[in-house]
Image (tube, grey):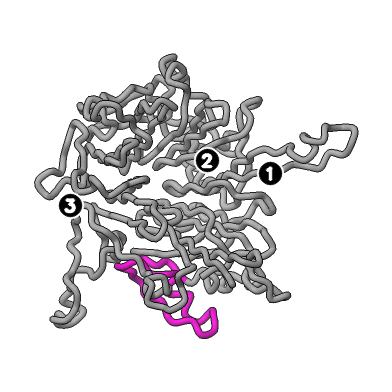
Amino acid sequence: MAVSRAHATHRSLSHLLLAGFNPLASTASSSFQGQARQSLSNPSLAPVPLSGWLAAVGREADVVDPLARPYSVRPGGIAGGAGHSLVTYRSWEGMDRIMALGRNEAGQLGVGFASQEGTRGLVEGFEGEEILSVRAGVQSTYVLVRDEGAFQPWPLASSRSRFLKDRTILYSSGNLARGRLGQPALYSPSSTAEDAESSRQHTLPRATVVELPAGEGRLKQIEAGFEHLLVLTENGQVFGTGCNTDGQLGLGSASSDIYQLTRLPLPREVEKEGGVERISAGADTSAIITKSGKVWTFGNSEYCQAMHGQKIDQIVSPLPIDSSFLPSNRRIIDYRCGGSFALALDDRGSVYSAGYGALGLGKDTLQLQKPQRIDSLEGAGIDRIRAAWGYAAAVRDAEDSSALFTWGLNTVHGRLGLGALPHSSSSGPPNPHAPPAVPMHVYEPQEVKLPLRELGLDGTVGGRESVRWKLGEVELGMEGMWVGLDVSEELD
């Protein structure tokens, strides 16, 4: 549990929850006095002892205030990649940092070294800036920060600009191959087979600044696919780097690799639709969503996950989806690709799916060319959707009535967070009193039970009427689902 710096009448707390594989189960048992041994698997959402994890990597100072003031260890951003995860937090001193954990064979954790065994530590290479966003792909990590810049005294700047000369800085770490990190000075195409083999071993284990296109201003959003990165600037331009074999960078051709951030040529119709509002990237498919609610997708669509109603192996330039599946007077506000399937969310809270796999439409509908509405989520008030490696989630944001739904392919560790896993013969005879086992495939959205009782938020504890809670970030990684739970309390 984490407590923020409080005003006299109010304090905020933040809990970090995990379902699925617990990457620190083997290391957290003895590193923090009084802390119970953690389970390797969390088939239900369970709070994770972030404070203890930080103590395990020598950051006790971030959670222990020598003046006994309320401190802040508050997850401000979560990213789940292919075997590694990132959790940002703010120390009681107001310093933003990132805890990275999981696989690190290519230095993707950004902790300063690569390792063949899973590990954990703080991302290195920057300090002091406000962390705006973190993203993770296959052996890659991206960090977007805000830097206020140096103080400019009179008369060099106006009273406004001398305090507000801020900018965004993008960092990357991990595997330099395929250009996914956008570091052309450190890794570029080799002219000989011998050089190419040597270059494939190059890793970048420390967060390193990515050169941004000159004159484009601040970055608004970053999104990562398997081996490619998209960024959106505040002036509405989109740039990409990395693997482009399926056209997932939208550059007009399916080239092998792009090694630096390169502008995506936007169709004129996008500008007529108000320009780009947000971007999305998942697996080898990408999307831009305009301010008017039109979705343009590109990249791989061999399972119809780009929502064009037909299979297209390579879409090399942004192509508007056929939105005839939408009821009249509705528009799409989000699109997420989970590899072989994709989800779309409209402005009335309806969710649609297409492709192959986690469609949420029952066991008899595992493949669709044209998007179809997930009727079981109708009326649930969905505000957010998430899609990743074979499973999906939908979120209703309604403070104490918030809810989380998941479906798709489960794992032996229970990443869907829906409870007990199928019984294994090696674990002894079945317990007749145990709750029903959750199958490895969940074909329709199921509501995830939140650990409200364990956190004293279910109303059973007296004097808690002044406590309010809501769901924070929800992130789907390959091995587990991370959920933030934010709590506010009025003090006497």
Classify 10 Å Cα crowding around label 2: few (below 14), some (14-19), many (20 and above): many
Whether residue 31 appears in magenta in the rendering, the answer is: yes
Q: Along the horizontal axis of the image, is 92 left or right of 187?
A: right
465 versus 433 height, above or below? above
Tell me which amino acid carries mark 2: Leu
Looking at the rendered structure, the kind of residue marked 3 is Tyr
Quick one: SS at disc 2? loop
Depth check: 426 or 81 in front? 81
Name the quarter where the C terminus is drawn: bottom right
Which circle marks residue 452 in the picture? none
Q: Residue at x 52, y 24 (%)?
A: 263
Q: Amino acid at mark 1?
A: Asp
Badge 1 crowding class, 10 Å Cα cut-off, few under 14, some 14 to 19, many 20 or more, is some
Mark found first going from the N terminus, 3 or 2: 2
Eye-nearest disc, 3 or 2: 3
Q: CA distance from mark 2 to mark 1?
A: 21 Å
Which badge, 2 or 1, comes first in the chain's sequence? 1
Q: Residue furthest left?
A: 364
Question: x, y percentage for residue 261?
Answer: 54, 30
Tag on residue 147? Answer: 1
Expressed as whole percent of the image width and height from the top left, the position of residue 80 reads 42, 53
Query: How far is mark 3 from mark 1, CA to CA?
Result: 45 Å
Identified at 44% across, 62% down, the residue is 469
Residue bearing mark 3: 443
For the record, the magenta segment spans: 21-48
Residue 53 shown left or right of residue 363 in the figure: right
